[in-house]
């Protein structure tokens, strides 16, 4: 079984869906922009805005934090949401009949979502930069690997929540709350010794260095990049393990097709 | 002629669902059966009999408590998910599709997940579309199709994966008579031309009787019959009788029949009486005649009741329930 064949199938499916649900696609980007606008106007209005963590009281920090947060939300919620939606629609069990195994389908779904969302979210970033007048360094060679390392932890949460969704089905409330938890990870000050072990946190700080200070990937401290990678990989692995445990429970209880 | 290849071998399959308060329900109770390659098997049973659970355990969508399942000799548990290259299924009919994708997009998507992507495969998809009369709807979004067309698309998506074993769980659910007939015709054609092993689970006896040669009847998680349909039907055919009497219901007839033949019915309209009775033993016919003669009954007509799979099924399930309750 060729995983490329699965990836092509899922990319084609998601691309077709994206086009047919174009209003939904555009409106979700507009919603994110409106939220950003409120935050931006709030920051402008608060002259006493305190320096907290990665934001460091700067508009650049807000733009970058929002950019990383948007990708993180996409990363954790898309898989979990799609599991809920597929179970409701009745297609989940069909995906489980893939001879390569469902984990490949889930993995390819994650890649497909990231690929299809990359251009719109980068466009959103450009619009955010235009709104704030803060033009940041878009060095994609440095940015893309760091972004992947950073959101690896968010994917771990996606797998964990996806697994829980297989067993408990209705987790929409947790999804909403979790969006704010992610913001918490992004604004934790890096000067705190334990901050680098949180998901997203250290990666977000490294992205800040690239986008604001113009540092290239290979100029960043190797220890920091490796720590960000290991922390992301650890959260990802924990998420996949939780997913596997939940998948086994769902199969034992016959819950895969339930909604 | 060589020995038939065993496509599916199920041994002592048991699945128990545990509920709150330490209660448990045995959905499938130590069932065993084999299906040969090219065979079309019907899986019958009342609601909750364990049909879907059995299919989902075979497909690995549910984990059985005990038992062994082999598909073309491969142990499903040990070779999962690779073993799925040999199996596909329609599980919830039209719900198995992406309604925002077109018929063709759905076919391509599910076939690709099975690695079925060659030019020859695509010719096969076109052929399936023709067989199921979906040519005009090839590029229509599934949400815009009728229920029957959605159901047919779902079956096409399953068959497009070209697996040697196909499960069809309630394939005619929600179909009108014409579409159901069309589907039966196509399934028979596919079974004979492509040598596929097809397992059909349905409440629709006509479909099973028309498409399958052999049937397994499940009741309360156990196999209560596993035979060729013709044998099952003939088993009941010779012993179900309908007798018309040219008089009102004779006194004491109902009681006499009830005491001797369980389930016997006597109905009258004041002028004529109809007696329906199932005879269990070969010499029961003489006992029946004796009872009628003793009450001076005037027999107008006596006939073997037409027995079909539905009657055989109902009788088997009824007996099984009685046995279960009495034990």
Image: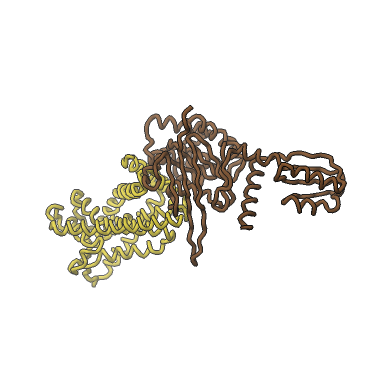
Q: Foreground: B195 or A116?
A: B195
Which percent across, then down, holds residue A23? 41, 50
Q: Foreground: B231 or A63?
A: B231
> Is any part of residue A172 visible from this angle?
yes
Quarter containing the C terminus of chain B = bottom right
> Is any part of residue B173 visible from this angle?
no
Compared across the picture, whether B255 is left or right of B136 comes to: right
Which percent across, then down, holds residue A62? 25, 62
Which percent across, then down, holds residue A37? 31, 61
Compared to residue A72, the image places residue B144 above or below, namely: above
Compared across the picture, whether B103 is left or right of B234 comes to: left
Which percent across, then down, holds residue A209? 17, 58
The color chain A is rendered in: yellow
Query: Which chain does the brown colour mark?
Result: B
Compared across the picture, whether A229 is left or right of A124 comes to: left
- What's the colour scheme? by chain
């Amino acid at each position: 079984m060729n995983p490329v064949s699965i990836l092509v199938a899922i990319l084609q499916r998601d691309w077709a869906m994206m086009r047919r649900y174009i209003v939904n696609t555009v409106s979700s980007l507009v919603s994110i922009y409106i939220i950003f606008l409120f935050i931006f106007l709030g920051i402008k209005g608060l002259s006493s805005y305190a320096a907290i963590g990665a934001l460091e009281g700067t508009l650049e920090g807000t733009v970058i934090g929002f950019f990383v947060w948007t990708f993180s939300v996409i990363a954790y919620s898309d898989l979990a949401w799609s599991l809920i939606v597929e179970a409701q629609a009745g297609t989940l069990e069909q995906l489980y009949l893939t001879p390569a195994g469902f984990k490949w389908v889930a993995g390819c779904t994650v890649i497909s979502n990231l690929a299809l969302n990359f251009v719109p979210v980068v466009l959103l970033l450009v619009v955010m930069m235009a709104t704030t007048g803060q033009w940041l360094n878009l060095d994609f060679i440095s940015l893309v690997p760091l972004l992947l390392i950073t959101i690896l932890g968010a994917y771990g949460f996606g797998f964990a929540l996806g697994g829980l969704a297989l067993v408990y089905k209705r987790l929409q409330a947790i999804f909403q709350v979790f969006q704010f938890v992610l913001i918490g990870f992004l604004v934790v000050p890096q000067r705190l010794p334990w901050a680098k072990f949180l998901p997203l946190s250290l990666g977000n700080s490294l992205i800040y260095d690239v986008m604001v200070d113009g540092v290239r990937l290979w100029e960043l401290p190797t220890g920091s990049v490796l720590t960000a990678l290991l922390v992301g990989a650890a959260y990802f692995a924990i998420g996949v393990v939780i997913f596997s445990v939940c998948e086994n429970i769902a199969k034992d209880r016959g819950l895969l097709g339930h909604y | 002629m060589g020995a038939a290849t065993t496509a599916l071998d199920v041994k002592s399959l048991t699945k128990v669902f545990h509920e709150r308060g330490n209660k448990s329900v045995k959905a499938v109770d130590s069932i065993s059966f084999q299906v040969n390659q090219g065979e079309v098997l019907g899986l019958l049973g009342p609601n909750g009999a364990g049909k879907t659970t059995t299919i989902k355990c075979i497909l690995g969508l549910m984990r059985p408590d005990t038992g062994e399942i082999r598909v073309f000799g491969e142990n499903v548990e040990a070779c999962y998910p690779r073993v799925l290259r040999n199996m596909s299924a329609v599980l919830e009919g039209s719900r198995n599709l992406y309604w925002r994708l077109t018929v063709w997009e759905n076919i391509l998507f599910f076939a690709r997940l099975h690695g079925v992507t060659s030019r020859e495969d695509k010719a096969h998809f076109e052929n399936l579309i023709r067989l199921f009369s979906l040519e005009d709807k090839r590029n229509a979004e599934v949400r815009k199709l009728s229920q029957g067309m959605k159901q047919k698309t779902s079956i096409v998506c399953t068959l497009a994966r070209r697996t040697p074993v196909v499960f069809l769980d309630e394939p005619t659910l929600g179909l009108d008579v014409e579409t159901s007939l069309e589907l039966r015709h196509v399934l028979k054609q596919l079974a004979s031309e492509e040598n596929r092993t097809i397992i059909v689970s349905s409440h629709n006896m006509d479909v099973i009787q028309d498409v399958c040669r052999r049937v397994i009847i499940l009741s309360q998680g156990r196999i209560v019959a596993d035979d060729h349909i013709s044998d099952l039907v003939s088993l009941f055919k010779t012993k179900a009788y309908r007798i018309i009497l040219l008089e009102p219901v004779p006194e004491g007839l109902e009681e006499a029949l009830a005491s001797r033949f369980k389930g016997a019915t006597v109905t009258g309209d004041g002028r004529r009486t109809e007696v329906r009775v199932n005879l269990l033993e070969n010499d029961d016919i003489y006992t029946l005649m004796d009872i009628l003669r003793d009450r001076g009954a005037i027999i107008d007509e006596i006939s073997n009741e037409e027995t079909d799979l539905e009657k055989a099924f109902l009788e088997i399930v009824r007996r099984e329930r009685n046995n279960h309750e009495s034990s």
